[in-house]
Amino acid sequence: MTRDEIIKELEEAILEVDGERVKNAAMKAVEVGVTFKDAVDNGLAVGLKKLGEKFESGEAFLPHLVMAGDQMDEAVEILKNNLPGDDDFKGSGTFLIGTVKGDIHDIGKNIVGVMLRVGGFKVIDIGVDVPNEDFLKAAKEHKADIIGASALLSTTQYEQKRLIELLESEGVRSKYKVMVGGGQVTQDWADKIGADGYGKDALEAVKVAMGLMGVENKKI
């Protein structure tokens, strides 16, 4: 197979959610020396975006996106350990996401995480019931561009406000964009607490995140 054929195979394998095919295509990419950026940006990411479009139109479902996202992560591990050029690949940015302290709901957070990956973001999911100090620690560790704080309950959404206050008190507020979301969260609330972005659903959250990063807002 030529390099172009392998890149196309990576795209189609992800689109078909065929894990074995994805892995084999990644190994072929290593064999022929496809660059990391080409393999991910023009192969895997294209397939995942097309799958996201099928999800949006009702032709694919959330489990397909979750499986494809996991398959892409496995392929990226194969590629980055064996191909040059991974230091130049930035994607849309690094998005740290978690559910705030006192809240253990994660379905909405997980859906947003999957769609962010479709949008080309590197997603760091730090789980549920996360203290604000752990958000900050993880943001520093992973060099996050955006911190996403999810809260389903009206009683826990105040942790989103406290997170922003913590970033301000630590003198690092300007280093991170902060997005908030969840069942009781609104644009008015996001504006009130000084968040940089809010999405009423997963698709809007990705578009807002892309806007914050100055990334071309392609159809997700």
Image (cartoon, helix red, strand yellow):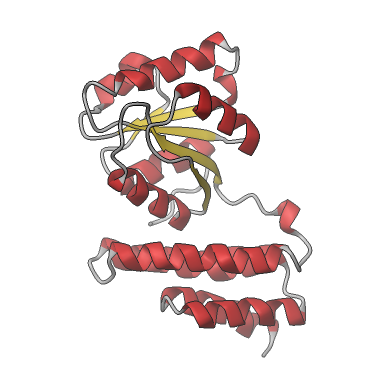
Residue 78 location (% of width, % of height)? 66, 69
Q: Is residue 63 above or below residue 6?
A: above
> Which residue is found at the position 64% from the left and 49% from the top?
90
* Residue at the farthest bottom position: 1
Q: Quadrant of the C terminus?
A: bottom left
Q: Nearer the viewer, residue 176 or 107?
A: 107
Residue 20 location (% of width, % of height)? 52, 81
Q: Nearer the viewer, residue 216 or 188?
A: 188
Q: Which of the 4 quarters of the picture holds residue 41?
A: bottom right
Q: Quadrant of the N terminus?
A: bottom right
Residue 105 location (% of width, % of height)? 28, 39
Residue 190 visible, this angle: yes
Q: As drawn, is 127 to the left or to the right of 107?
A: right
Residue 145 location (% of width, % of height)? 56, 35
Q: Which of the 4 quarters of the picture holds residue 66?
A: bottom left
> Which residue is found at the position 20% from the left and 29% from the top?
184
Residue 38 visible, this angle: no
